[in-house]
Amino acid sequence: MPDQDDAKLAVRVTGDRIMCALPDADDRRSKAGIIIPATAKTADRRGLWGTVSEIGPLVRSINVDDVVLFLPDSAIEVDVRGDVFLIVRERDVHAVASSERDVGPTGLYL
């Protein structure tokens, strides 16, 4: 078996998993203009928006380059060739922002 440190291995997301680019960890501002550092922990369950870079074969309603909303507790952080990504299951995605105008069915069924 070749030395895996030297080989460039292809990464494939499996099942209903989605690989997202890690959102920017920039400082944010409150409504009053107070700067909240990226290292500050919040007690609330603040969701993260991430850009989808890869999808697994069982993902049905999300495409590459969509922006998805998920909770950080439901994601796994991975390092792929020096870049950090988050992997989350499709069922843990709470919202999808897509650039396509025709987003298809709403997913609501009676």
Image: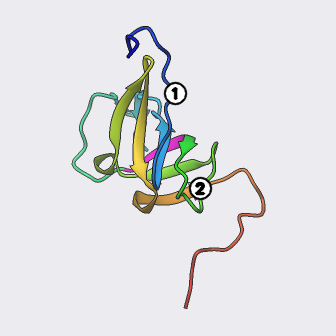
84, 26: nearer the viewer: 84
**For this view, does 26 lie left or right of residue 41?**
right
Check the image and tell me how it is coloured. rainbow
The amino acid type found where label 1 is placed reads Ala
Separation (CA) of disc 2 from disc 1:
22 Å
The amino acid type found where label 2 is placed reads Ile
* Residue at the far right in the pictured view: 101
Q: Is residue 9 visible?
A: yes
Residue 103 in which image quadrant:
bottom right
User: First in sequence: mark 2 or mark 1?
Assistant: 1
Q: Residues within 10 Å of mark 1 (few under 14, many from 20)?
A: few
Instruction: Give the position of the C terminus as an image quadrant.
Output: bottom right
How many circles with numbers are drawn on the protein?
2
* Residue stretch in magenta: 47-52
Residue to which mark 1 is pinned: 10
Is 11 above or below relative to 5? below
Residue 50 in the magenta stretch? The answer is yes
Picture disc at residue 62: 2
Is 45 above or below relative to 11? below
